[in-house]
Image: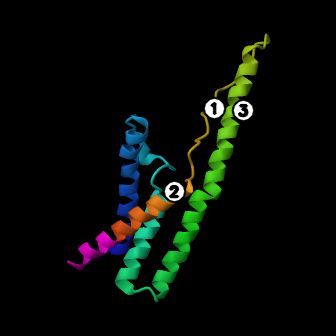
Amino acid sequence: MNKGVVIALSSIGIAQALKIPIHFLKHKEWKPDLFFATGGMPSSHSAGVSSLSTYVALKRGVPTIDFALSVVFGMIVMYDAQGIRRQTGELTLKVNDLDELIDKIHDHETVKYEEKTPEPLKEVLGHKPGEVLAGAAVGIFLGMLGYQFSKK
């Protein structure tokens, strides 16, 4: 079994699970379905790649190609999580608002209009920079913890 993969996937799961109590503390609303949701605090993408990079650094060393690969790909993942995916989420908010506006216009229309109601687009796709940093911190901690347990 590849311990790096196990640690990274475990970190993703733990970060996803942390979204539930963090959301509860912030909004006083219990939402277990956040475990399967994208976006939010902390970034599970960042936790996964950070834990893997930390584990590789401790296991193989910082000057290795393994560490270089994990850091470079990790940075790309974190940049994407807070850049492109976040912008897509912002655009989705505007599209969903536009859909509501069109519904309001149709309410005042006298012509009978039938339209199949599409599901609203998912609005939380990416992460704010703080969510990415929090995910990275969770990942670094879990990577160190995973390395300590793998030595035993």
- Where residue 123 sits in the image (x, y, percent)? 59, 42
Q: In the image as oriented, which residue stretches furthest toward the top?
A: 110
Q: Residue at the location (54% across, 73% down)? A: 73
Amino acid identity at mark 1: Pro
Marks 3/2: CA–CA distance: 28 Å
Q: Residue at the location (40% across, 38% down)? A: 31
Q: Does residue 99 appear left or right of residue 43 in this picture?
A: right
For label 1, count other residues whose C-alpha is less than 10 Å away and answer few (under 14), some (14-19) or many (20+): few
Q: Earlier in the sequence, mark 3 or mark 2?
A: 3
- Where residue 24 sits in the image (x, y, percent)? 38, 39
For label 2, count other residues whose C-alpha is less than 10 Å away and answer few (under 14), some (14-19) or many (20+): some
Q: Which residue is mark 2?
A: 130
- Where residue 118 sits in the image (x, y, percent)? 63, 32
Closer to the camera in the image, 53 or 41: 41
Say which quarter of the image contains residue 26: top left
Residue 37 position (above or below residue 65): above
Of the residues tagged 3 and 1, which is closer to the observer?
Answer: 3
Q: Does residue 116 appear left or right of residue 50 in this picture?
A: right
Residue 2 seen in render: no
Amino acid identity at mark 3: Leu
Say which quarter of the image contains residue 114: top right
Residue 118: which disc? Answer: 1
Marks 1/2: CA–CA distance: 32 Å
Q: Tell me the magenta residue range.
A: 144-152
Question: Do the CB atoms of the residues marked 3 and 2 lie less than 8 Å apart?
Answer: no
Q: Which residue is mark 3?
A: 98
